[in-house]
Image: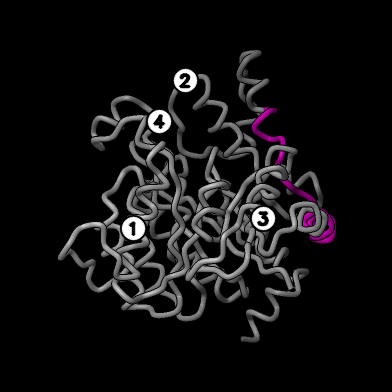
Amino acid sequence: MTRLSILDRSLVRQGHPPAEALRDTVRFARQAEELGYHRFWVSEHHSVPGAAGSAPTVLAAAVAAATSRIRVGTGGVMLPNHRPLVVAEQFGVLESLHPGRVDMGLGRSVGFTGGIRRALGVGKEEADDFGDRLAELLGFFTGRSAYPGVHALPAEGLRPQVFVLAMGAGADVAAAHGLPLVIGGTGGRAREAVERYRAGFRPSAWAALPYVVAAVDVAVGPTAREAALLQVPEAWSTAHARTRGSFPPLAPAEEVLALEMTERERALFEEARKGRVHGTAQEVALELGGLVDVMGADEVLVTMNTYDLDRRLDSYRRLAAVWPATAAGRDG
């Protein structure tokens, strides 16, 4: 059975403080566990008004402490922003406190603006060193530190599950290091990346076989129209970011649809709504099943952010009800 997992980006809602978004994430993780989802991941964003999740390992620790069965991790820690030793130590602590439940999802993005990159002390070129930083990080867990006499404690000897988020050359890096791959999108480029990944995969101490996690934005409602409305708030924040340079807190769908958008804003808003899956539970289950077949996915990582948290939970509940693996997770 193909498992379902969740990525929650701790997006801020209009009229609500960022701190509330973080508390909502922890509460949502408990609900996801009850529904039988396999993993619950949090993300890393810096200086984004509409995203509260800036410290994913700290937030993952809070999520793990509030749950008991669901796997917990990051989707992901942006490795160019951090020293590998510090990342190893952080995940060593997480794995020590919650053995067998920790996922270390890693990405290669850097800050979106020059100011953020300067504040983080990194440049755009840091992303090109992702493979080397990844090897250094993994070495701290296997006892093969690149620095004589330096040990990442308590990470050394531990084995959290490691994933590479496919961004650009990420699929090739995942294959070369023998790690599971997380990839978004359903188009030809995504499928080609998965094919390259499987063809180039080298078995490692971390994974004997290729493993593909397909990431997709999914909304489920009583009708397809109601489901589509759930994705309106984030689509507008995305369009706003592309036209004005700032991703704002999520606004209610009805408020967004009443806006007088410029021609460019309207085009970007409609573009942001494409590629997202929505419909009734049966319609979405059928579409996701097709995605699994096309991508050869071993797991599906779903995400959906909207203004109304009760409707968000209802969407995830409806999806869990028609997906066999979540029922097994509830029973387990």
The reply to whether the magenta stretch includes residue 276 is yes
- Viewer-nearest of labels 2 and 1? 1
Q: Would residue 254 appear left or right of 157 to someone viewing this image? A: right
From the image, tell me which residue sits under label 1.
137
Compare marks 3 and 4 and give the one earlier in the sequence. 4
Compare marks 2 and 3 and give the one earlier in the sequence. 3
From the image, tell me which residue sits under label 3.
198
Q: Which mark is residue 112?
A: 4
How many angstroms separate mark 1 from mark 3 (CA)?
23 Å
Q: In percent of the image, x 62 and y 67: which residue is there?
A: 209
Q: Position of residue 34 (x, y in %)?
A: 58, 76
Q: Which mark is residue 244?
A: 2
- Viewer-nearest of labels 4 and 2? 4
Query: What amino acid does circle 1 point to?
Result: Leu
How many angstroms separate mark 4 from mark 2 (CA)?
13 Å
Query: What amino acid does circle 4 point to?
Result: Phe
Q: Position of residue 155 (x, y in %)?
A: 29, 71
Q: In percent of the image, x 51 and y 64: which residue is there?
A: 40
Q: Position of residue 213 (x, y in %)?
A: 63, 58
Farthest-out residue, bottom: 332
The reply to whether the magenta stretch includes residue 175 is no
Compare marks 4 and 2 and give the one earlier in the sequence. 4
Of 162 and 175, the residue lying toward us: 175
* Vertical side of 149 occupied by 129: above or below: above
Q: In percent of the image, x 47 and y 44: which residue is there?
A: 13
Q: Secondary structure at mark 1?
A: helix
Query: What amino acid does circle 2 point to?
Result: Arg
Q: Secondary structure at mark 4?
A: loop
Please state the extent of the stretch shown in magenta in the rendering.
270-288
Chief secondary structure of the magenta span?
Answer: helix
